[in-house]
Image (cartoon, grey):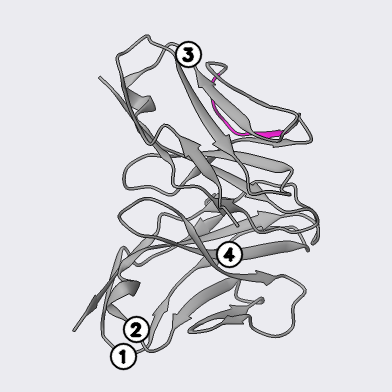
Amino acid sequence: DAGVTQSPTHLIKTRGQHVTLRCSPISGHKSVSWYQQVLGQGPQFIFQYYEKEERGRGNFPDRFSARQFPNYSSELNVNALLLGDSALYLCASSPPYKETQYFGPGTRLLVL
Amino acid sequence: AQKITQTQPGMFVQEKEAVTLDCTYDTSDQSYGLFWYKQPSSGEMIFLIYQGSYDEQNATEGRYSLNFQKARKSANLVISASQLGDSAMYFCAMREGDRGSTLGRLYFGRGTQLTVWP
């Protein structure tokens, strides 16, 4: 079975721009979570979506938003990019009635 | 307060030896889960092992075992018979909430960089 997929793999943007990151969960998984991992730190939770509804939000500004589509894929949007948004963005999905989150390969975002 | 503490920034182990990576956690919930993930330089987080707070036996998955000491709030990862391919960053994580629920955020530690030498 295919794992979690994310696109693009790498992205370079300039300050003030907008970015959209995409994630497709493992088939059968209805929950998608987004994490930001800054260099040298552990991942920080941004959002969780389940059945197209937001079910959790981390301590991130309103510039960060997300949505989940009927096929359970998800987008993470970041507006007005700052240098500090440079990070690895990880998407994870969970199977029904299970706690484990399975991660994709991530999108490396560099803001110049 | 930190939910997950990993005090070892780096660990070194010789091939075929066992190594223990430390993790302590902080929660007031009775129901929670503990996870270990491996992150190679490529960046992908690879799930290794899970321990539920109500599990009486320590979890094992192949060469990985989780030394769960509830009273001490520790969940150390033991890797037996280390291999060169085990060199990576290892993260301990916790999720608070009921078992069997797919909802809930993961709290991660800062990670331990493991280097296996021949």
Q: Do the residues at pointers 4 and 3 share their chain? A: no
Q: Position of residue A51 (x, y in %)?
A: 79, 35
Tell me which amino acid carries mark 3.
Answer: Asn
**Residue at label 3?**
A79
C-alpha separation, residue under disc 4 versus residue under disc 2: 19 Å
Label 1 vs 4, first from the N-terminus:
1
Q: Secondary structure at mark 2?
A: loop
Q: Position of residue A102 (x, y in %)?
A: 58, 54
C-alpha separation, residue under disc 1 versus residue under disc 2: 5 Å
- Chain letter belonging to callout 1: B
Tell me which amino acid carries mark 4.
Answer: Phe
Label of residue B35 in the image:
4
- Chain letter belonging to callout 2: B
Of circles 1 and 4, the one toward us is 1
Label of residue B28 in the image:
none
Q: Which residues are magenta?
A: A55-61
- Residue drawn 57% across the image and 63% down it: B25
**Residue at label 2?**
B82
- Residue drawn 60% across the image and 75% down it: B72
Image quarter for residue B71?
A: bottom right
User: Which class describes the residues within 10 Å of circle 3: few (<14), some (14-19), or many (20+)?
Assistant: some
CB within 8 Å, label 4 to label 2: no
CB within 8 Å, label 1 to label 2: yes
Q: Secondary structure at mark 3?
A: loop
Q: Do the residues at pointers 2 and 3 share their chain? A: no
Tell me which amino acid carries mark 2.
Answer: Ser
C-alpha separation, residue under disc 4 versus residue under disc 3: 32 Å
User: Which class describes the residues within 10 Å of circle 1: few (<14), some (14-19), or many (20+)?
Assistant: some
